[in-house]
């Protein structure tokens, strides 16, 4: 096998892995958003829903633990598939900040949806406080 054919095959393998790496990253982000949304709903200073302890474990701690495992696996696979090539610290700083901000926004959006459906079920009508800082528009 000549070098050019080998390089084409290696690039194809990297491309196939990139799809699954993106899926792992999305799953990790979704799990973080679920845990953060639960924290926003049930923390006394923001929502104070006074939910039971079991819900704290199921929707607060379990998603964070799973997200840490998924993101650690993502990191290990990225380093095995790509080596050190895509990670220059200066270039990835903005991507890390954007990922964090998207997780916070997703959590706040999940909170609004949760409150919308809970209040609709309890009152028969939707009533979300007007002071919420994230809109779904």
Image (cartoon, rainbow, N blue to C red):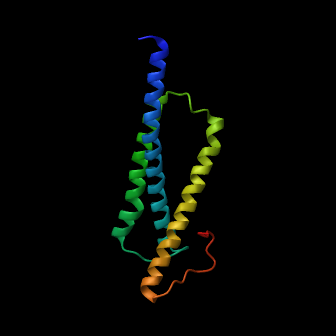
| Quadrant of the snapshot with the N terminus | top left
- Please provide percent x and percent y for residue 93: 63, 42
Residue 123 at x, y percent in the picture: 46, 89
| Residue plotted at (43% across, 34% down) | 16
- Examine the rendering and report whether any part of residue 42 can be seen: yes
Q: Which one is in front, 11 or 96?
A: 11
For residue 113, above or below residue 18 = below
Q: Is residue 48 visible?
A: no
- Where's residue 85, x and y in %? 56, 28
Q: Of residues 77 and 89, which is closer to you in this image?
A: 77
Which residue is drawn at the image coordinates 57% and 33% (left, top)? Answer: 87
5 up-or-down from 104: above or below: above
Residue at 45% over, 88% down: 124
Taking the image as shown, residue 54 lies to the left or right of residue 126, namely: left
Task: Judge left or right: residue 101 versus residue 32.
Answer: right
In the picture, measured across the screen, residue 92 lies left or right of residue 78, that is right
- Identify the image quadrant of the C terminus: bottom right
Q: Is residue 128 above or below residue 93?
A: below
């Amino acid at each position: 096998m000549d070098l050019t054919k080998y390089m084409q095959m290696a690039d194809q393998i990297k491309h196939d892995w990139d799809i699954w790496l993106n899926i792992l990253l999305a799953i990790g982000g979704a799990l973080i958003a679920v845990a953060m949304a639960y924290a926003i709903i049930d923390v006394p200073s923001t929502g104070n829903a006074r939910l039971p302890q079991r819900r704290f474990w199921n929707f607060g701690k379990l998603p964070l633990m799973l997200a840490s495992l998924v993101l650690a696996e993502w990191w290990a696979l990225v380093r095995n598939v790509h080596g050190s090539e895509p990670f220059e610290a200066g270039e990835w700083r903005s991507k890390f900040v954007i990922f964090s901000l998207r997780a916070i926004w997703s959590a706040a959006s999940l909170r609004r949806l949760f409150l919308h459906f809970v209040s609709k079920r309890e009152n028969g009508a939707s009533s979300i406080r007007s002071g919420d800082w994230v809109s779904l528009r």
